[in-house]
Structures are given as structure tokens and as C-alpha cells.
Amino acid sequence: MEPKRYTVEEANALLPYLAPALVELREKWEEANEVQRTRARVAMSNGGPRHMEDGSEVLDRVAELMERLQGWGVEVRDVGAGLVDFPTTVEGEDAFLCWRLGEPEVAHWHSGDDGFAGRRPL
């Protein structure tokens, strides 16, 4: 299946839904990392399956949020920064519209090879 290609207008229209999902994902991401570290320590100490259930809700919520973002066809590049790319086409080439949480609108793009460092104004 061909990935969705966003126009600037379509990307901007998604921001009111995307931003809250990213804020929650960023909050839950740290919790999920702590759950995984705790589970690794428990597993090494043979703490048993009861401790493995602790934190399942957080991990499930992170998975739900990631699935939602994937369903929209966006690519999360950095959870902590809230950095997201929207697949697009620029001058007939694959590219990405680039947006970071806190920016008022999608106003940058970059090629597939450049990444964030090569982002340019629209």
C-alpha cells in the first residue's frame, strides 16, 4: 500500500489532533521506559510474573498512541521533541513536511536524505 502523501493544508488540518496525541505520548513515553527498566531488573532478579503486570496500562497506552500516529501515516522522528514528518512530494521527489510540537503550523520540509538538519522553509 502506498503511504499517504500530505499537502501542507492536510498536514496543518491534522495538527489539532496530532498535538494532543504527541503531548500524551511524550508523557507516557518516559513512564513506559521506566516500566521497561523495572521489568528488566525484576526479570534479572527472578521477581516473577506478578511484577511484570505492573505498568501494563502505560505500555498499552503508548502502543495505542503509536498506532494512531501510524494510522495517520505520519512518522514520529523524536518523541521527546515532538518531531513529526509528513510524507509528501516536492518537485516530483519523495520528501517530508517537517513539524515540531509547539510550532503554530507546518512551515518546513526536507528531503528523505537530509532529515531535520536539512529542513528548509516552505
Image (cartoon, rainbow, N blue to C red):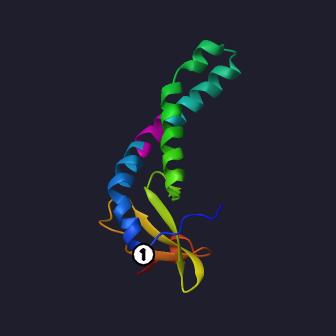
Which of these two is toward me, 33 or 96? 96
Per the image, the residue denoted by label 1 is: 108
Q: Residue at x 63, y 65 (%)?
A: 2
On whether residue 18 falls in the magenta region, the answer is no
Which of these two is toward me, 11 or 118? 11
Residue 65, position in %: x, y?
48, 43
Left or right of 93, for residue 55: left
Which of these two is toward me, 110 or 116? 110
Segment colored magenta: 25-31
Left or right of 105, for residue 47: right
Q: Is residue 9 above or below residue 25?
A: below
In which image quadrant can residue 102 be found?
bottom left
Q: Is residue 79 above or below residue 107?
A: above
- Within 10 angstroms of label 1, few (less than 14), some, or many (20 or more) residues? some
On whether residue 28 falls in the magenta region, the answer is yes
Residue 81, position in %: x, y?
43, 56
Which of these two is toward me, 8 or 54? 8
Q: Residue at x 53, y 69 (%)?
A: 5
Q: Is residue 15 above or below residue 41?
A: below
Residue 113, position in %: x, y?
62, 75
Q: What main secondary structure does the magenta stretch of the protein show? A: helix
Which residue is at the far bottom?
Answer: 91
Which residue is at the far front?
Answer: 1
Residue 115, position in %: x, y?
56, 71
Instruction: Quadrant for the C terminus, please.
Output: bottom left
Q: Is residue 99 above or below residue 89?
A: above
Instruction: Quadrant for the N terminus, please.
Output: bottom right
The amino acid type found where label 1 is placed reads His
Q: Residue at x 41, y 50 (%)?
A: 22
Q: Which element type, helix, strand or loop, lies under badge 1?
A: strand
